[in-house]
Amino acid sequence: MNIEKLTAVYFVGAGGIGMSALIRYFLSKGKQVAGYDRTSTPLTEALNKEGAEIHYTDDVRLIPSDYKNAEQTLIIYTPAVPESHSELTYFRSNGFTIMKRAQVLGEITEYSHGLCVAGTHGKTTTSSMLAHLLKQSHVDCNAFLGGILKNYDSNLLLSDKSDLTVIEADEFDRSFHWLKPYMAIITSADPDHLDIYGTAEAYKESFDIFTSLIRPDGVLLMKNGINVTPRLKEGVKLYTYSVTAESDFHAKNIRIANGEIIFDFVGPGISIDDINLGVPVKVNIENGIAAIAIAWLNGATPAEIKEGMRSFAGPKRRFDFHLKKENIVLIDDYAHHPAELRESILSVKALYKGKKVTGIFQPHLYSRTRDFVDDFAASLSLLDELILLDIYPAREEPIPGITSQVIFDKVTLKNKTLCRKEDLYEIIGNGKYEVVLMAGAGDIDRMIENVKQILDKK
């Protein structure tokens, strides 16, 4: 891919969070950018205002003429787009260069020092932490993130002095196999995307392969105890991390009180006391250890690390506080896998001991619901109260017999409600709440503002 020769870049599936970072990247390079997405969202509208031309109907006639020169136009698509998509078919039939989003990121890591963060869950927060730690230090970095980082109101960070590039490494459709990491973090490897991988073993194998892509002068930082068998090139250094002391990088002297989390960071040849988590949620201790370790290995100083963690505001939709009052708290979280949902719930309960925690959860994908129904039920049973919405289908067609009811029936809570989206506001209006956690990867985030207004009035 020769970026200098390109005049135009066209995105098929432009509205995804990962795709939008690339759109902003190519706009920053002065390229013409257009594309298609299925629905208009606040993100696509923001991209239009920034200079992209995005439309919402799959129609070849809507492709602007500036994007029909195959020699000067790059086509980037997301694997979530079906093979039958007419615009994608047009580009394939007319000799255009077509790349997956991850292939383009792979090209970028080819010519920079890629710091790639992979994992079933935790990767967005960890990569965002790492990007912020480096960005506000003397080291600096570029970053392609899977969430909008609130410190910068963007998922793309650019630098004119650093060739470090933080990338969220997505395992969906084996996309992260296109990357060429200098350093890599693996936060977790709990089975997911079994509609793509087929088996838990195949999913695990994809992470093993990912470790083999790390450059010989690089580093793998892996959460202690996860189910990954590294296949490292000679010369790659392997470190482990966790909250506890049996890992190379770990925390000690953890203090949780008054809405704050403070801990000491310890690693080979390094100790930093009294680190204050900017987003004080228990699971972020572990995410923070991983981000701090890689930031330190790339030259960030202890003082810079302490200030970076204190000022970290988090990515949107990762423990995003929308109400934080004495009598009512509303938190939004992207958790959509049973393991991360469990961690999310436990973190909220640790932060608000003695208060009733109500979860509003929207399952994401029929296949994920089918594959992990027992695990979802176990995680949701940790709540004090559950409001369970219908499944958000995303790219999938319905699977016979798979609805939210299959989770609902296995949840052991007495205080549980199965709810259609259109009935949620009435249910919220009639209930009594102390801490509300809204979670899911579908369109539940579009309901937050209305829920916030109802709770705020109460």
Image (cartoon, rainbow, N blue to C red):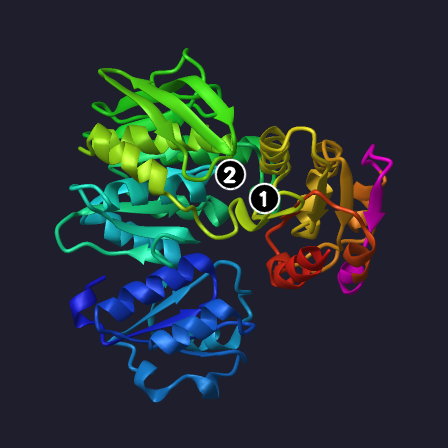
Give the image quarter of residue 422.
Answer: bottom right
- 358 left or right of 217? right
Give the image quarter of residue 184.
Answer: top left
Numbered mark located on residue 121 in the image = 2
Q: Amino acid at mark 2?
A: His
Q: Is residue 188 visible?
A: no
Residue at the spot of label 1: 335
Name the residue rendered at 64%, 37% in the picture. 338
- 225 left or right of 115? right
The local crowd at label 2, few if under 14, some if 14 to 19, many if 20 or more residues have their Cα within 10 Å, is many
Q: Amino acid at mark 1?
A: Ala
The local crowd at label 1, few if under 14, some if 14 to 19, many if 20 or more residues have their Cα within 10 Å, is many
How far across and how far down the image is residue 63, in percent? 42, 83
Name the quadrant of the C terminus: bottom right
Tell me if label 2 and label 1 are in contact, CB under 8 Å: yes
| Residue 412 painted magenta | yes
